[in-house]
Amino acid sequence: MKTFQYEVKDELGIHARPAGMLVKVAKGFQSKVTIEKGEKNADASRLMAVMALAVKQGETVTVTVEGEDEEAAFEGIKAFFEENL
């Protein structure tokens, strides 16, 4: 299991477009990707779950990657956050 924290910089937070892109990236890996904000968490491969977190600019999320290809998934998801959020 690998984990990282990320402060969202996008002025709209994790809104529909990047959430949809994130789901597509997460589904490309066999590992389970979970996003946690406060007491809530969501499976990153489920669009409505990610949207329900209502992550805003300046908020920090914890991303956990666990599974067969977790090293590749961790790098891919981390790069996605840095480039898009």
Image: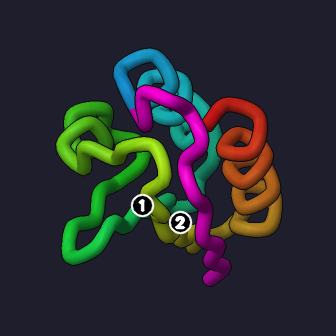
Where is residue 10, by image quadrant?
Answer: top right
Q: Residues within 10 Å of mark 2 (few under 14, many from 20)?
A: many
Provide the secondary structure element on which disc 2 rests. Answer: strand
Position of 19 compared to 50: left or right? right
Amino acid type, mark 2? Val
Q: Which residue is mark 1?
A: 35
Quarter of the N terminus within the rendering = bottom right
Image location (x, y in percent) of residue 45: 41, 42
**Circle 2/circle 1 CB separation < 8 Å:** yes
Provide the secondary structure element on which disc 1 rests. Answer: strand
Residue 83: mark in rendering: none
- Identify the colour scheme used: rainbow
Magenta segment boundaries in residue numbering: 1-14
Image location (x, y in percent) of residue 53: 24, 50
Residue 63: mark in rendering: 2
Amino acid type, mark 1? Ile
Q: Residues within 10 Å of mark 1 (few under 14, many from 20)?
A: many
| 62 relative to 24, above or below | below
| 29 relative to 27, above or below | below
Image location (x, y in percent) of residue 68: 67, 68
Where is residue 47, by image quadrant?
Answer: top left
Residue 84 included in the magenta stretch of the image: no
Residue 9 included in the magenta stretch of the image: yes
